[in-house]
Amino acid sequence: MKSNLTSNTKTMITTQNNIGSLSRALLMSCTLVLSLLILACSDDDNPPPQIDQEEVITTMIVTLTNNNTNQTIELRSQDLDGDGPQTPTIEVSGNLSVASSYTGAIALLNETVSPAENIDQEVQAEGTEHQFFYTQGGGLNVSTQYLDIDNNGNWIGLAFALTTAAPGQGTITFTLRHEPLKPNDGSLSGAGGETDISVTFPIVVE
């Protein structure tokens, strides 16, 4: 009788130990699941930062004001469908005068929204990340000079001076680079970065 009691007692102890081990394992599993849920909720509460979208630029307007006569020449490019099949509309309101100096100003618009959004204001505010470059081609003989700088003292190019020399005709390409090397050697290849917009205008100096 005593032997049977002892055996039953050992069986009960073994069973209790098994139950205790099972309970501890279950508790650890619940704790792990709860930790994962808390971590997931924490990730939801702190989503990754949004990446700034690239500016949409449909229109470039370059205004050239003759410093002697105050006559203005407007260079305008409009491309409302962006990468769509339609070609940009390019207009030049008149010819430049020989041996003259002009003050230039560049305006950039997003006309896919109403009212149109002034992108040049964003470029000015983020001047350390942007720079315009002016490239002439053909038989054109003009010189350009930057007139505006960013917070680090490097060129932006929304404002510039242009001086004509002898009569001739050719092109001027205005290229806006995003995150170029600054300062740089003034060339597109030396600046690097990504092109936000690039427009070539036909120019006549007479």
Image (cartoon, helix red, strand yellow):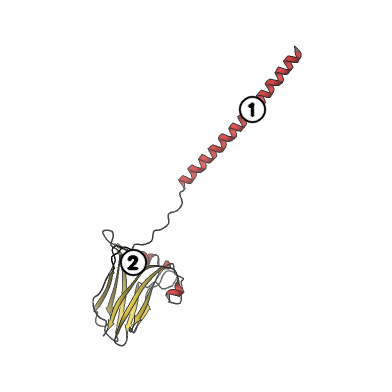
> Amino acid type of disc 2?
Asp
Q: Nearer the viewer, residue 68 or 81?
A: 81
Estimate the x, y position of residue 38 in percent, counting from the top left.
Answer: 51, 40
To which quarter of the image does residue 138 belong?
bottom left
Q: How many marks?
A: 2
Q: Nearer the viewer, residue 205 or 125?
A: 205
Give me the residue at 54% from left, 37% from top: 33
Residue drawn at x 61%, y 29% as measured from the top left: 23
Q: Picture coordinates of residue 127 (x, y %)?
A: 40, 67
Q: CA distance from mark 2 to mark 1?
A: 71 Å
Left or right for 57, reference 36: left
Q: Quadrant of the C terminus?
A: bottom left
- Residue located beneath label 2 in the image: 120
Picture coordinates of residue 27, whole percent (x, y): 59, 32
**Left-right relation of 8 to 82:** right
Q: Is residue 111 left or right of residue 182?
A: left
> Which is more N-terminal, label 1 or label 2?
1
Q: Nearer the viewer, mark 2 or mark 1?
A: 1
Choose top left, top right, bottom left or bottom right for residue 174: bottom left
Q: What residue is pinned by disc 1?
A: 20
**Element under disc 1:** helix
Direction top: furthest residue: 1
Name the image quarter holding residue 94.
bottom left
Type of amino acid at the residue the image marks with label 1: Gly
* Residue 78 drawn above or below residue 51: below
Which SS class for mark 2? Answer: helix
